Structures are given as C-alpha cells and as structure tokens.
Amino acid sequence: SARLVHRNNIDLIEIDNRWSTATISLFGGHILSYVPKSDGRDRLWVSDAAIMDGSKAIRGGIPICWPWFGDLHGQADTSLPSHGYVRNQTWRIIHIQESDTGTQLQLAPSCVQGKGFLGEASLLLDVHVGDELCISLITKNLGDASLSYTAALHTYFAVDDIKHTELTGLSGEYKDKTQQFAIFQTPEPYRFSAETDRVHLCQPSSLSINNNDKHTLVHSEGHDSIVVWNPWADKSTSMADMTNEGFRNMLCVETAVTTTKVVAPNEKHVIVQRIR
Ligand code: BG6
C-alpha cells in the first residue's frame, strides 16, 4: 500500500508492501527510509537533528543534488545554493503503481528552472521499492541547445559504528576535498578515522558497505564518480542539523556526475542507484 501523510509542513508517502517499507518526502523528492522485511534494517540514516519542516534540505536519506553538485565553481553569484535547488523544493507525484515486484513511483520537482542553470530540462525521479530500492534520476533536454549539468544521489547510509565500517569496491585515485582537491590513492582496506570528503574518479558499478556482519550493497549506473563523505566530530558539532555524535552512524556514498555532463537536444541522461 502507499499512503500520503502530512507531518509538520511536509507530505510523506509511506509505502508498505510484501518486500519492504519506505518513506519518501515530497519536500525534496527525498527518500528517508528503506527497510527490507527480510532483516528489518533501515539502510538509510536521517539525522536526529534534521530540520523537517521544509525550510532546509533534510540532513539524511537521499537528497537529490541537481542541476549541480557541490558549489557551482566559477560563478560570480555566490548566493547559489550548494548542491542545486531541487532538494529544497516541493515535488509532486506523477505516477504510483503496485506491481508484482513492488511499488513503482515517479516524482518530479515543481520547477526545474533556476539561477545558474540555463538549460531547458525535465527532471524525473523514478523509484522502485521492492526487494531492493532502485532510484533513477532522469534528466531530459527539452531545449534546442545542448544542456550541461552535474548531479548526485547523495545517499546517507546507516552504519552501526563508522569506526568499524569498511567500504569495498573502490580503487584508483580520488580527489580530496579536505585538501584542495589534491589527488591520492584509495586506501586498502578503506576505513574511517577522520573527516572524509572524497571524489573517487573511478566508476565501479558495485560497492559494499560492511559493518560487523551487516552488508549494504550499492549498485550505480550513469555516474562518473563516487563521492564518499563523513563530516566527523568537529564538523558535526558545527552543523546545526547534526548532533555532536551523529557522524558515528552514517556514511554518504554518492552516485555522482561531478564532471559536466552534456546532454544533446531531445536526449536524456539517467543516473541510477540500487540499494540492497
Ligand atoms: C558532500 C560534499 O557531497 O556533501 C561535501 O562533498 C559537503 O563537501 C556535503 O559538505 C554536505 O553538503 P550540504 O550542502 O548538504 O551540507
């Protein structure tokens, strides 16, 4: 079943089917939880201090960063928001349907035009909630000129303890955002003991987040990078929507396009993340 509930200032879709439950906020087109019934473990993390009234992007779940990832470098206008503007908008339901493999849903933001983005586009988030969570972000160029964008499915995964978490599947070089984008080699094993903000330039399709005996599988398509982020203690303390200890239970592994993607007129580009 799928039902719409109104909490604080935002509308939530609550999905409950044979395979799993999920909660999706129409503010941001933002998935907040995904719990497979096979083990009852929420794959996603939402901050205990998240602002849930529609006044700020929700800290946790799966924010949609579009039509740019991070800061829009080289723009004179510094008022442009980090990670684009659709995570701060109210989205609408285009389509919702139960099938014999789960619940299928399509959402679109109310407005895809904005300062700093000159293209004519449509954006659609396609979500399948079943024995896995599959999300596709579909950007279509509706204009006569080519369209350029960057984006990310900025997923906050839940972990029991970041200090006992290992990420497998990444290799090669990454750009370190905590060190002016200096390039380093991916550590092996990949573990966490400090602030981490990395753009991995390789494009593996399958990753695994392992903590103790729990594994979360992340499959990506249509991306050019994987971004790995954990703010650690000091930054968590400085962020109003993170508790001081919040960093211990999350790890962002983002399926991202960080190098400008050019989409020709009438063409579309799709970024996919599948979670199990
Ligand atoms: C990550 C970025 O993707 O998102 C980080 O690489 C950033 O640099 C983080 O701090 C959170 O961004 P925001 O805008 O949600 O606070």
Image (cartoon, grey):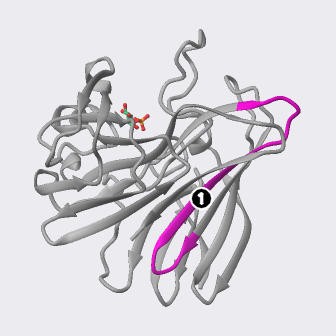
Estimate the x, y position of residue 143 in percent, counting from the top left.
86, 35
Quarter of the image with the C terminus in it: bottom left
Estimate the x, y position of residue 92 in percent, counting from the top left.
71, 58
Q: Identify the residue shown where x is 15% and y is 72%.
A: 213
In front of the other: 28 or 65: 65
Q: Residue furthest front?
A: 172
Q: Is residue 256 above or below residue 238?
A: below
Q: Identify the residue shown where x is 38% and y is 61%.
A: 218
Q: Residue furthest top?
A: 76
Q: Based on the displayed image, in which of its 4 quarters is residue 32 positioned?
A: bottom left
Q: Is residue 193 above or below residue 32?
A: above
Estimate the x, y position of residue 109 in percent, counting from the top left.
69, 49
Q: Which residue is mark 1?
A: 136
| Left or right, 177 with reference to 30 | left
In front of the other: 237 or 176: 176
Query: Dot 1: what SS?
Result: strand
Magenta stretch, residue numbers:
128-147
Q: Identify the residue shown where x is 18% and y is 55%.
A: 166
In front of the other: 147 or 112: 147
Q: Is residue 60 above or below residue 186?
A: below
Quarter of the image with the N terminus in it: bottom right
